[in-house]
Image (cartoon, rainbow, N blue to C red):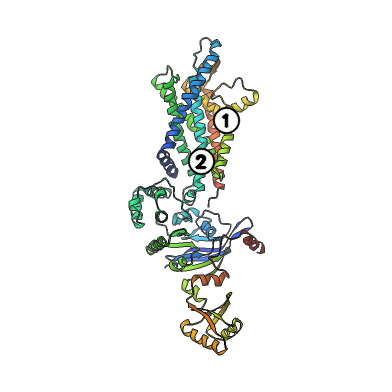
Amino acid sequence: MTGTIIEVEGLYHRFGDVAAVDGISFSVNEGEIFSFLGPNGAGKSTAINVLITLLRIQQGRATIAGHDVQRDPQQVRNSIGIVFQDVTLDRDMTCREILEFHGRLYRMPSAERKKRIDELLSLVQLDAKRDVRTKQLSGGMKRRLEIARGLMTRPKVLFLDEPTIGLDPQTRMRMWDYIKAVNDEGTTIFLTTHYMDEADHLSDRISIIDHGRIIATGTPYELKNTLGEDLIYLETTDLQRTRTILSGMSEVKELREKSRGIVAMLAGDGTKILPQIIENLAGGGIRVSVVNLKKPSMDDVFLHFTGRELRDEGAEKPATAVTRAGRR
Amino acid sequence: MNTGFLTVYWRDMLRFFRFKTLLISSLVQPALWMAFFGIAMSANFNRLTSEIPPIPGVPSVDYLTYMAAGVIAMTTLFTSLFGGIVLLFDKNWGLMREIFASPLPRNHIIFGIALSGMTKAFVQAVIIMVFGIFLGAAFFAGFTAAETIVSIVGILLFVGVFSLGFLFLSAAISISLESPEGLQGIITLLTMPIFFASNALYPIDAFPPVLQAISVVNPLSHLVNGIRYFAIGDNFQAIGIYYTATPLDIMLSFLLLITFALLMFAFAWWRFQKATVT
């Protein structure tokens, strides 16, 4: 890790009245895997499209590998590889031709192109599919071919927009292995995802993004720790008094009401604090009917920062975004 | 020199030869025009004009020869107007993102597509010439070998510049639109006046003034002038009309086609600068 490779400052992007990206600043360190985690419609793809020069910068500044995205898009294009959100493969070209076309687009010399195609096809284990048209590939193979294409020009940064969307669990795990392998070879990876487990499993650092803003940034460990070390969920005979008792305990950092119970975020090891809590409650005449102790997950982190669960998020309602834009 | 446009050309040619139905239909279609429309109309026109006394001292060509030049022009027009449609598909299927995010300058996309469209137009023009001569069109009659070669080069020059103009137009429309149906509609709207207000299949002498005026600025008419000049000659009669052309006339027609191509390139360039693909 020798410094930052992506720097973004005060980036805004509007479509008409809708602020898709609403003032974000962040930086990505060289060699890390950095994730944008957020629901559909949070502005992840818009941000990525600005960084990969498909959308013009409206306001703000961004540099990638030392090149200004606005002033020097050509150099930026030469420094990055991209795997787009949905499959962008010509159905009627073979795997080799897809890579060949890409190498030519970036003006790679012919000998280097050939060598690179061989290397990459074996990296993503598609040697056998070399002369097969992409329409005959499975979803996972297509994605692997796209990753190979993104790496064709030995980019400094590889952008992955929702890399495992629509893939089955086994294929997702394998994709994660490929992404890690690519990262181990020194390529910085910028990925967007709305899968908690993906961000958690892959990333060195995560920015949680919602409504076009970054609401928290950190390592998965740091983010989870902002909630306290452990979480305890309780259902009791008297929630009102449970709350009073728990808020009096120094080990309890924060309390959050659920529909039928209460979640306590703890400052220490839950396995040791839980018996004490039950004891205190019993002392106050309250009986605990349900208890659950867990380490915080990215879902809890997301819920904590945005006040809503990610998974019940459908498509972002345009109306909310408009109201937000109007309020600014 | 940046040869990036060759990459776009390479891919489009790859697809052209890969889709056997596309390849064969685009080669057979102009031949069918000659075989059916040509022979049928030729029989009619020859009967209708058999009463007209020929102009003495001017070589006479039959209708098949006359319209073969028109069929080359027409085929070039259709092929070129549809030549940009691949850009619309690339855009709709997300493939254009790869190209737009690459270092390839955007005008190279226009050049590459135009070059591949032009290649297809050349192949079709040659097929029609060969097939036309086989059916009895009196192309290059009485020409020496050297004259024939010069004439073929002349025809291909006209076909090339003309096709570039309409390929640029097609690219400009394709990159601006969202739906193939819209493109289809616009192309149909364009082809009708261009095709029928021209001298491709019949003389324009009897047109009402408005149609004649359209025909005079119609690039298709100028392409046909050029093809007839090179394939038949500068002095002949057909369907009772006397045709002459000086080298200056032909130069002017060629200049008009070049101007048209340049204008259409400017239009396409502007549309490509404006285009956003995400």
Asked if residue A198 is positioned above or below residue B59 in the image, the reply reads below
Check if mark 1's residue and mark 2's residue have beta carbons within 8 Å: no
Q: Can you tell which quarter of the image residue A327 is in?
A: bottom right
Camera sees residue B2: no
Camera sees residue B166: yes
Same-subunit check for callouts 1 and 2: yes
Residue placed under numbered mark 2 in the picture? B85
Q: Residue drawn at (49%, 31%), measured in percent from left and top?
A: B76
Q: CA distance from mark 1 to mark 2?
A: 19 Å
A120, A231: nearer the viewer:
A231
Q: How many marks?
A: 2
Residue placed under numbered mark 1 in the picture? B194
Percent from the top left, x then y, of residue A210? 56, 65
Chain under callout 1: B
Instruction: Give the position of the N terminus of chain B as an image quadrant.
Output: top left
Percent from the top left, x then y, of residue B137? 45, 20
Which class describes the residues within 10 Å of circle 2: few (<14), some (14-19), or many (20+)? many
Q: Say what amino acid the circle numbered 1 marks.
A: Ile
Q: Reading the chain from its start, which is encountered first: label 1 or label 2?
A: 2
Asked if residue A165 is positioned above or below residue A277 in the image, the reply reads above
Which class describes the residues within 10 Å of circle 1: few (<14), some (14-19), or many (20+)? many
Callout 1 secondary element: helix
Q: Say what amino acid the circle numbered 2 marks.
A: Ile
